[in-house]
């Protein structure tokens, strides 16, 4: 059985958690393949909103096993808080949640390093969530990180101490005022590790291989979005992992020829959290309305998201890099009430009109070129089938499908799992 992928195609926050939750009924295994607790996947059903950071979004379904893959970095303290929040739902976590032994651990000193590094950048800061993600991936590629499997060894605390001592020396190098009590942070960390060790650790690449052989249906769940990819995103304002389809192969140990459908998720407009270029960003009443109606605040940080019109140049780029086979459009309901909608279809790049995503999209290089379309005023949130969608919305969807050359299979009209229209 092929492994299907579900990816965000913008700067994250596209609504992946909701769609994974909706799709889980069709899959046996949901597997996270990259990122860390800087992700915030929001699910809403039965009147309750859930925010997951590391645990895959299929955790609420009895039929699915959830795997945290080797490409993920795990903070035991945050992971424990997630588990604590799930306790009241009486889920069989032990049999539903497996963790790859090759996944790397975020140490308390990784978070401190993150804060010191960001503080040292001054105005050039990248907008880190300060969760220790970047320093953890640096240790991974530097070949001295700690992995989940190390916790099964008798001398793991010695390895921890050696790495933490190195980190403290690095923190002092930054020469910034970072106040912390490492003993207190370590007490929480060691306690959380003891809880983490009660879960099932697996050789995830072998587990998934055997699951494929047994005919199990697997959905790989991405975190963040394609424009935050360490290679193909708006560097350096990116995350520290490969958020694109290729990251699922390295983050789970799945061979490229085993990838099936690639499901890409995008908002009907564009948002971005933190620093970095954003050609279609709005600073007017339209942008304020998008943010207010769309409740655009980071699920992890609470920071307000920057809002703007849909950027088709960037979206086409993400579709091509990922090999997207079907699309899901989120938050169409937020655009209800706009008399006119704009879609960026090209860039004026250094005086030349281009339709591809260039090396640098900073404002001094790029001005968006817009096409304008009619909006719709109907409230979409109570609609349950495609034939109820307003004419102007269908025209908007048709236009996007023609430009992107990929079908839009799902239109989300609200945050609840029931507010999902199949086309």
Image (cartoon, helix red, strand yellow):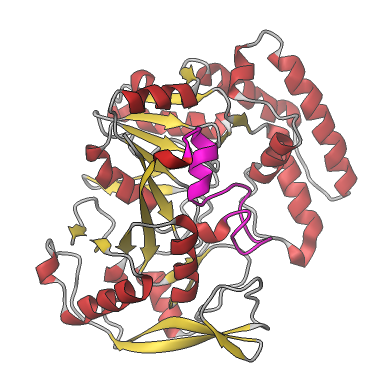
Q: Residue furthest top?
A: 154
* Residue 208 x, y percent position in the rendering: 41, 27
Residue 277: % across, % down: 61, 72
**Residue 261: % across, % down:** 34, 49
For the residue pair 423 and 325, the one nearer the viewer reads as 325
Above or below, 423 relative to 376: above
Identify which residue is drawn at 39% across, 77% down.
Answer: 289
**Quarter assignment of residue 358:** bottom right
Can see residue 64? Answer: yes
Above or below for 369 versus 256: below
Q: Residue at x 36, y 76 (%)?
A: 403
Indicate whether residue 237 is drawn in magenta.
yes
The residue range painted magenta reads 229-255
- State whether residue 39 appears in this view: no
Furthest residue toward bottom = 351
Measuring from the top left, give residue 244's x and y in whole percent: 51, 52
For the N terminus, which image quadrant? top left
Quarter location, residue 94: top left
Question: Relative to the observer, which residue lies in front, 352 or 62?
Answer: 352
Q: Is residue 385 above or below residue 103?
A: below
- Residue 381 drawn in magenta: no
- Tell me: 277 left or right of 198: right
């Amino acid at each position: 059985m092929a492994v299907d992928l579900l990816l965000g195609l913008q700067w994250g926050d596209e609504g992946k958690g909701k769609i994974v939750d909706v799709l889980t009924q069709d899959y046996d295994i949901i597997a996270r393949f990259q990122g860390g607790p800087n992700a915030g996947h929001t699910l809403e059903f039965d009147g309750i909103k859930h925010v997951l950071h590391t645990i895959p979004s299929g955790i609420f379904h009895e039929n699915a096993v959830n795997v945290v893959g080797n490409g993920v970095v795990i903070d035991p303290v945050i992971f424990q808080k997630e588990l604590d929040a799930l306790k009241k739902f009486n889920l069989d976590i032990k049999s539903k949640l497996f963790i790859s032994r090759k996944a790397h651990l975020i140490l308390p000193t990784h978070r401190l390093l993150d804060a010191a590094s960001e503080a040292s950048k001054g105005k050039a800061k990248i907008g880190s969530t300060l969760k220790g993600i970047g320093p953890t991936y640096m240790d991974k590629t530097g070949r001295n990180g700690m992995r989940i499997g190390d916790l099964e060894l008798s001398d793991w605390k010695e390895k921890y101490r050696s790495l933490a001592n190195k980190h403290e020396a690095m923190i002092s190098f930054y020469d910034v005022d970072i106040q912390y009590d490492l003993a207190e942070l370590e007490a929480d960390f060691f306690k959380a590790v003891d809880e983490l060790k009660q879960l099932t650790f697996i050789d995830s690449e072998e587990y998934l291989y055997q699951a494929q052989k047994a005919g199990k249906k697997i959905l790989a769940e991405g975190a963040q979005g394609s424009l935050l990819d360490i290679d193909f995103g708006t560097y350096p304002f990116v995350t520290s992992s490969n958020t694109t389809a290729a990251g699922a192969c390295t983050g789970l140990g799945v061979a490229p020829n085993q990838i099936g459908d690639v499901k890409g998720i995008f908002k009907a407009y564009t948002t971005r959290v933190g620093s970095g270029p954003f050609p279609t960003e709005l600073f007017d009443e339209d942008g304020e309305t998008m943010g207010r109606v769309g409740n655009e605040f980071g699920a992890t940080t609470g920071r307000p998201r920057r809002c703007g019109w849909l950027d088709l140049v960037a979206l086409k780029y993400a579709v091509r890099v990922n090999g997207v086979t079907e699309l899901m459009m989120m938050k169409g309901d937020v655009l209800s009430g706009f008399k006119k909608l704009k879609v960026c279809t090209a860039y004026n790049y250094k005086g030349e009109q281009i339709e591809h995503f260039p090396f640098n999209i900073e404002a001094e290089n790029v001005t968006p070129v817009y096409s304008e379309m009619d909006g719709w005023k109907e409230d979409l949130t109570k609609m349950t089938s495609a034939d109820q969608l307003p004419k102007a919305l269908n025209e908007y969807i048709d236009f996007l499908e023609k430009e992107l050359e990929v079908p839009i299979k799902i239109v989300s009209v609200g945050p609840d799992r029931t507010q999902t229209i199949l086309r």
